[in-house]
Image (cartoon, grey):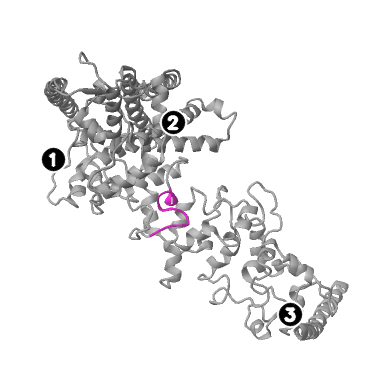
Amino acid sequence: MMTTRRRTLRSFLTAILALAILPLFAGAASALDNGRCVDCHGDRGIPGWSPAEKASNVAPGGTKAQRHFGGNFPGMSLYVDPEAYKFSVHADLSCTDCHADLKDLPHKAGLKPVDCSGCHSREAAAYAKSNHVVSFDGKPIDDPPRCVDCHGAHAVPRSSVSTSPVYFRNIAATCTRCHGSKEITAARNIAIPGAARMYAGSVHNRAIVDLGLNKSASCVDCHGAHNMKDRRDPSSSINKTNLPATCGRCHFGVYALYKDSVHGTALAHGVPDAPNCADCHGEHDVRAIRDPGFPNVSIAASSCPTCHAAEKLTARYGVPVDKVRGYQQSFHGLSARLGDKTVANCASCHGDHAIYPSSDPRSTVYPKNLPVTCGKCHPGATANFASGNIHVGPGGTGGRIKYWVERLYIWMIVVVIGGMIVHNGFDYFRKMQALYRRRRQWKQPAYERLNRSERTQHILTLSTFFTLVVTGFALKFKWSVPLLSDETNVALRGGGHRVAAVFMIATGVYHVFYAVFTARGRGQVWRMIPRWKDAEDIVGTIRYFLGLADRKPKFDRFSYVEKAEYLALVWGTIVMVVTGFLLWFQNVALKHIPMWGLDVATIVHFYEAILATLAIIVWHLYYVFVNPDFAPMSFTWIDGKLSRHDMEHEHAIELEEIDAYARRGETPPPDATRIAPEEE
């Protein structure tokens, strides 16, 4: 017993002595370390890195982030400002408290990285498990950022001081040093490399930077600071299931409504497709609703349809897919598409956060609540006002009646308008027939411009071209014939286009044989070759149009207009056939050309079709139907003839050539226009 008491007393005295002596040594060491360190590091002219280090931007012991930015991080300079250090959070610490491997002076270059866990054990333990240090699959991150990368090294202000890198107004800029770097985001395979840029324009950042508010979300408010987790981690604050609660820290009233809504309860029950805050508002680029750049300013056009118009999601959860389409066809939807920003959208009726099933009495679209909901825009609305199918379309109150009324009108339109078309078609046909008979009674000779073979080629080209135009644009824009099934329309669009293409190619082959193996065909092609006179004719015609000349130039067998049309037809046919076959037989094509080549073929095929269609409508059909000299229509494409009057005005040079042959009693060459026999 006595021995135990002596032993205890001896230990107590030893502890007292140690407590009295150790501070003396510590104080001496502290004074020695800080004073002598400042002698060198307090000099602004202290030598920096070695030439090799400067060349590679590698600081001694630096992280990848520091190397990327040339070591230009808070406190990473070798110079330490003694005055700034006095106001740092570590002002009462000595240099050796952090640089534990510093034993002698002068010390060796490249001290070991400082271990902050000695004092900040709780933060260090959390950070060691964070996504900055360990990936989601448990693998350690190569060369992760260290404490100094965010907090600074020597002049570390308190986080509540505005000069601190982790002050709430500065935290976004601190995170952007890495998350705004394309090199670092690519090397680390960061999921959203543009997060920093998007956050800069968000309502959260603008509230801090532009409005000067001190209550707005920064990076750490959502992601966490030291304990940042991957979004796939169930414990992460940005995990899909946890995100509403994270937003609810600031938006607690909205969160309370959302949590009890149809979306919130679905998310809580583990429904993977249930929307959370980010699905509607965005993640980093959250905008105010009144902001013109708000991505969901038209909720019915860009937000709700993301899920409610997605066929896979609606089929999975039994949600009607036609509601969005019905809204777009309704009065509200049509007004919204015309730019009306006051018309009702999805949220106006269903609510925004407190959305409940229509069978729930709390729902704004519960049948008994509809008069109140509609009454917000339509004062005095009654139950009868709100009855029916609000979204438009089949079903709802009076569904069978609406179905038959719609069908009745469709058939009425077909019968009435179809009858009008048939009636006026016969009227037009009889009048054109009478005009054609008067044409055949010319007292002057008729000149055959197109023989029977050439007229046949023209009719085949005309019919196949317009069939290709209609079916091609129907394929591109999914046009459908009313009253026919989707399967029939698909067959008409695809099959019709390909059949017309085959006939167009056959017509082209027919023309090539005609142009090569007949004397008339060879002569026609030779006359189609552009010559210097065509350029003179263009200038002369423009002068005539502007009133600078009294008459138009005289044209030969083919004017520059006809030559341009023919050469454009040849070029367009070749382009469309080549690109069309690449698209038709794409599996074979991709064995010989890269995918981008097929994309180029698609672009060329589409825009060449637009060019050709507009050229025919604006140029060719003008000369055949609208041109006052031939209105209401030139019959040459039907019977191949022109009157002498028309020849004098359109092909005066060729007419002079024909008359010269007649005076000499010679037979014109086979490619020339000839006087049509009387029996024709």
Looking at the picture, tell me which residue is in the foreground, 630 or 476: 630
Q: Which residue is mark 2?
A: 576
Looking at the picture, tell me which residue is in the foreground, 122 or 37: 37
Magenta stretch holds residue 284: yes
Q: Which residue is mark 1?
A: 384
> Residue at left 48%, top 29%?
578
In the visual, does 49 lie left or right of 244?
A: right
In the visual, does 657 lie left or right of 75?
A: left
Question: Residue 34 falls in which quadrant of the image?
Answer: bottom right
CA–CA distance between discs 1 and 2? Answer: 58 Å
Give the structural element (helix, strand or loop) at label 2. helix
CA–CA distance between discs 3 and 1? Answer: 82 Å
The amino acid on which the numbered mark 1 sits, given as a three-letter code, is Asn
The amino acid on which the numbered mark 3 sits, given as a three-letter code, is Ser
Q: Position of residue 394 (x, y in %)?
A: 24, 30
Magenta residues (range): 276-287
Q: Does residue 266 lie above or below 522 as drawn?
A: below
Q: Residues within 10 Å of mark 3 (few under 14, many from 20)?
A: some
Q: Position of residue 467 (x, y in %)?
A: 33, 25
Q: Does residue 426 lie above or below 219 as drawn?
A: above
Q: Is residue 266 something one can see in this rendering?
A: yes
Query: Residue farthest to the top?
Result: 679
Q: Is residue 633 something one can see in this rendering?
A: no
Q: Earlier in the sequence, mark 2 or mark 3?
A: 3
Give the structural element (helix, strand or loop) at label 1. loop
Magenta stretch holds residue 461: no
Query: Residue farthest to the right?
Result: 3
Looking at the picture, tell me which residue is in the foreground, 191 or 504: 504
Residues at circles 2 and 3 in contact by the CB criterion of under 8 Å: no
